[in-house]
Image: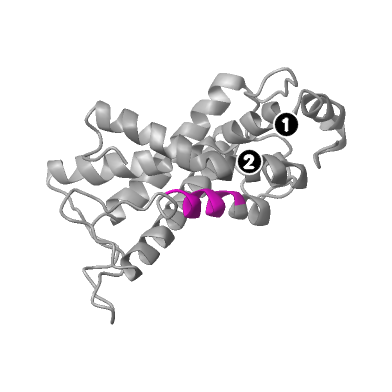
Amino acid sequence: MCLVVPHSLMSDVSAATDMGLIFLALMTLWLYLPGFIANTFAMMWGKWLPKTGYGPWPIDGGRVMKDGNRMLGDGKTWNGLIGGSLTAGLLCMLQVAIVGTTFDETTIFVTPLIGSEDAWFSIGGTYLSAYILGVFLGFACLLGDMTGSFFKRRRGLKREGEVSSKAPLLDTLPFAIMVFLWGQLFLGPSLLASNELLLPMAIIIVITPILHRSFNLIGYAIGWKDVPY
C-alpha cells in the first residue's frame, strides 16, 4: 500500500504502512491530534477566560428557535471557539518542534507537515505552516462539536448551568467526522488528505466515543470538567 505523497517520500511511507493497520491508525491520530483535543482547549477557554472578566459570549447570542430550545446553548462560546482553535495551532507547532520535519517510518510520531510543500497552508516557514494547519484542524473539530450541539438542542437535550446534557454519540462523532472530512477535502496534497488514511480514520471514528469518555474522566478527575461525560 502506498500513500499519496511526493515521490521522495513514497518508499518511507510505504515502509510505515507495512507495520500494520494499528500502527497506521495511531499515526493518523497523531497527525490529527490538534483537531482531536481542540474541545479540551475550548473548554479551558470557556471556563477560564470569564474568570478574568471577559465573556462568556454565546455563539448563538441566546437565540431560541421555533422548537422552543436554544440554537446551541451557553456551552458554545466565541471565547471557546476562537481560543480553542488558536491553541490547537500552538499544539501543532509543538508537534513539529518535537519530531522535526523529517520522516521516520519506524515511529507514529511523524511531522504533520509531511507532503505539504504545495498545500495552501504551507506559507511563511515551517512553524507558521504548522500553526495554520493546527488552527484549521481545531476549527473543524469545534464546528463539528457545534453541529452535535445543534442536534442535541433539536432533540430537547438542554444544558443546565454548568452541567451538559448527556448524548454519547452526538458528543463525539460529529467532531471526529468533521475533522477527518475537512482533512480529506481541504488538506491535499499533504499526507493528512491521503486516501489510504480512510480506513484508519474509520477505525478511529468507531473508537472515538471510548477515547472521548476517557479524556472526560481525566478532565473530571483533575477538576477541568463539571461532569464525567
Task: Please indicate whether residue 79 sits to the left or right of residue 2 in the image.
Answer: left
The location of residue 218, given as percent across then percent down, is 33, 28
Looking at the picture, which amino acid does disc 2 mark?
Ile
Magenta region, mostly helix, strand or loop? helix
Q: Which residue is mark 1?
A: 21
Query: Is tag 1's residue or tag 2's residue first in the polypeptide sequence?
Result: 1
Looking at the picture, which amino acid does disc 1 mark?
Leu
Mark 1 and mark 2: Cα distance apart in space: 9 Å
**Numbered range of the magenta stretch:** 172-180
Task: Please indicate whether residue 147 sits to the left or right of residue 83 in the image.
Answer: right
Task: Please indicate whether residue 42 sits to the left or right of residue 182 in the image.
Answer: left
* Residue contact at pointers 1 and 2, CB within 8 angstroms: yes
Residue farthest along the top direction in this orientation: 106
Q: Is residue 175 magenta?
A: yes
What quarter of the picture does the N terminus occupy? top right
Residue at 60 percent across and 49 percent down: it is 180
The location of residue 199, given as percent across then percent down, is 71, 43
What quarter of the picture does the C terminus occupy? top left
